Image: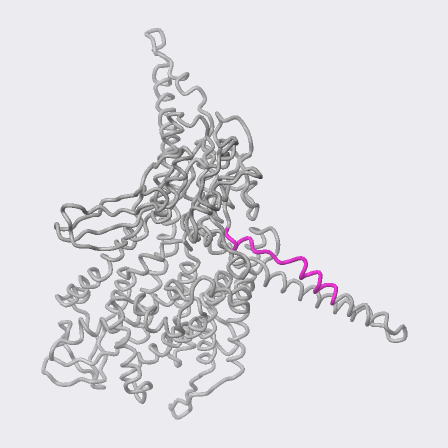
Amino acid sequence: DEYWQTLEPAYCLAFGAHSKPLSGSTSSAGGNEDTFLFENNESRECALTWEWTRQWSRQSSEVFSNSQSTSLFGRETGDDNSSISLAHTQQLSVRQEVLQFIERAMHGPVRSYVSILPTYWYYLLCRTLFDWAGKSYENIHARSDTITDHETIGAWKTFWSQFIDSVRNGTRDFILRNATYMISKGPVFLHSVLVAAPTDLSVYLIAYHLVNLDNWTKFSVRGQDGGDLSCSWQEVKLWWPFWSLVCSMTSWFNGYALIRTYANSMEAACLAVGVALLAPELFGELHLTKIAGMSDISGNHRPQAKLAFVLGGLSACVRFTSLAAWIPMGILISIRSGMDISILSNGSSVKLYNQTKVCGTLIKLCAAFGLLGVLIGCCVDRWAYGFWAVPFLGNFHFNAILGNGSLYGTHPFLWYIYAGIPAVCGSMLPFLLFNLIVLFSNPSQISSNCNKINNTRIVLFGIIVPYVILHSFSEHKEFRFLLPMLPLICVLAADVMVELVIFMEDGVAPIDVDAVKNSDGLVKRVENDSRGKLSARSKGLFLVMIMLNYPHLLYLGMIHQRGPIAVNRYLTSVISERVQRNITGRTSQSIHYLMGCHSTPLYSHLHIPEVKISAWYLDCSPDCRSSSEEICESDAFLNDPLGFVKATYDHLPDGVCVDSSDGNTCHRDYDHQASLSKLPTFFVVMQNEAATISSLIEDWGMEHLGSIRHSISSLSRHNRHNHEYCLTSVEDGRAICHNPITFFSLIDVHFEHIEIYSI
């Protein structure tokens, strides 16, 4: 549900009333039904979850303010001879305002609009196109005058004008016909370009920089004479970046999560790009500090490093938990910046530790530009919300201080270790574990020349481990919370893959290199035509990576829990057809989703030209979840679907009962149709609950419109005589049945369905 919870605010910001968020469910402005709803003065309804509408309580603020005022007043008037100076009073007032601002921020929204800026800009572009395409055609056929023999002079001009009109009108028709698809699926394609692609590129650049730390790699090889050339370095400049990119592009979790509008996707992109920009500071050789231009004693830093920490500040605005990665990175960079190597007069080198330089890097680079990123994020939220908000403080207050994250599910402390990381890594897990074992198998060689790359391992694991540990303290855990660590895991896994596919040939150099020893006994770097060609082992591993990732990526993306997206696609097609055929006689439609918490997307997947759609879903906000006296609408419906539907839609006048205590049905002597005036155009219900309430809503005059496969519910042996899967209503014995999908006449796959009812 995180996917469409971030789509809705962008849609609301672009298409809502006056393009302002936090306006609630705004109704479209009234007007002629023959006009399009894409005009600038028209707006559409939008839906925002509690994360975006959470507001600071005025009552608590007044108590806070009164207590401060009373204290200040007492100090001012308690003793005329010892009054507080004006400057001191102003100082206390500033302090009070700062405290009030922090209080408002901590009780305010928990989501930042920074993460949805790409989607918002895309929706603005769509709105511009819709406004242009939605304008009434100016006598489309009027300008296609018939050319007669007496109008031969203007024939070419008339033909060209008709051609331009046809192209323009065809473009308008195409835009309006595909408006729903553009709004619902466009952000996915946008994120694949603006989020997923930069992340993949950053993974490649990180590994490429690690290879280029020295002209040689870590691997020891043997010459053609079979002699051991241990501690020699052979160039494999493109293999590590290549396999890092393969790991990133074949990862099932990257393919599933990065293209979606998760806040974690933006966090992952910011972190991956930041590590790529900070690669010289994080991984560079200490004695190359001044040569590489990383930083010097004067405190100057590369523009790329400054940009990286601005991205870190923006990432913290999106999710404050990203600090679990950026703070260790800042500490590592600061410590490394203080390690200088001085060359003595006799030619020897001495390592020196400069504490001033460490503090300068920590403050002037990490903290200063990180705060700049936070300030930019706060300005974005100020513009979007209409008031000053610091969502990462609200997120911290809600999850860390109040501990309300546990309302959405809890897991054990070690869940990320035994479930989260293995699931997210997938086929990369063995390579990651091998890299970890190699790192700690011989710690004494970490500073050895033959193990220079171990320092890289320490830096990468130094970012991953604190991130996982700090997230483990939160009771609420999800796989997507580990997404920002996946690019670094790809680099570590590719490190082992290179050794597997290239440097494990028995006694033979993996690349046909004419090994020649120089004066120091090291193998010289030799260019050859075979470099960059995939061996049979490389092709086999590449195929294994695809086969172990893509099948279940396709399953998760196209089959498992596909109902929420498919049901809205089905509804929009039905509504569009009805409007075109003028079946309903109106351009206003209502949909009620009687399903669990945040089960389906709403207006971002229901955008139809010329149609106003009003959607309603069951409440499951933290206010009712955390209350011991209040029951959420979603829980009340799941506990008693029939009772909830009767109480919500079938209201009876005073003195009239539905069923008496002895089981006899009371006589209804009121206008039943008037009591059902609140019925929507469509009901969307899960199959289990639909079996309970289907008889009631069908008695109201609604009919079963269709069924949408949602997820696999069970598997069974094929029964050729009777293989229908049915759910029977307890009330009147009505059944909802669906045929399973049979494979090879052996196995029946039964699906859970979403049922749709319509007037």
How many marks the image carries: the answer is 0
Decide: is 659 above or below 52. Answer: above
Outermost residue, front direction? Answer: 662
Q: Is residue 51 magenta?
A: yes
Instruction: Report which quarter residue 223 is drawn in.
Output: bottom left
Q: Position of residue 664 (x, y in %)?
A: 45, 41
Quarter of the image where the N terminus is located: bottom left
The residue located at (51%, 31%) in the rendering is 669
Q: Is residue 650 magenta?
A: no
Q: Nearer the viewer, residue 363 or 599?
A: 599
Instruction: Report which quarter residue 470 is drawn in.
Output: bottom left
Q: Position of residue 647 (x, y in %)?
A: 50, 44
State which region is magenta. 49-67
Q: Nearer the viewer, residue 311 or 385?
A: 385
Q: How is the image coloured?
A: one colour
Outermost residue, left direction? Answer: 225
Decide: is 16 above or below 541. Answer: above
Q: Is residue 660 left or right of residue 497?
A: right
In terms of secondary structure, what is the magenta stretch mainly? helix
Decide: is 63 above or below 357. Answer: above
Q: Position of residue 105 (x, y in %)?
A: 60, 61
The residue located at (54%, 74%) in the rendering is 363
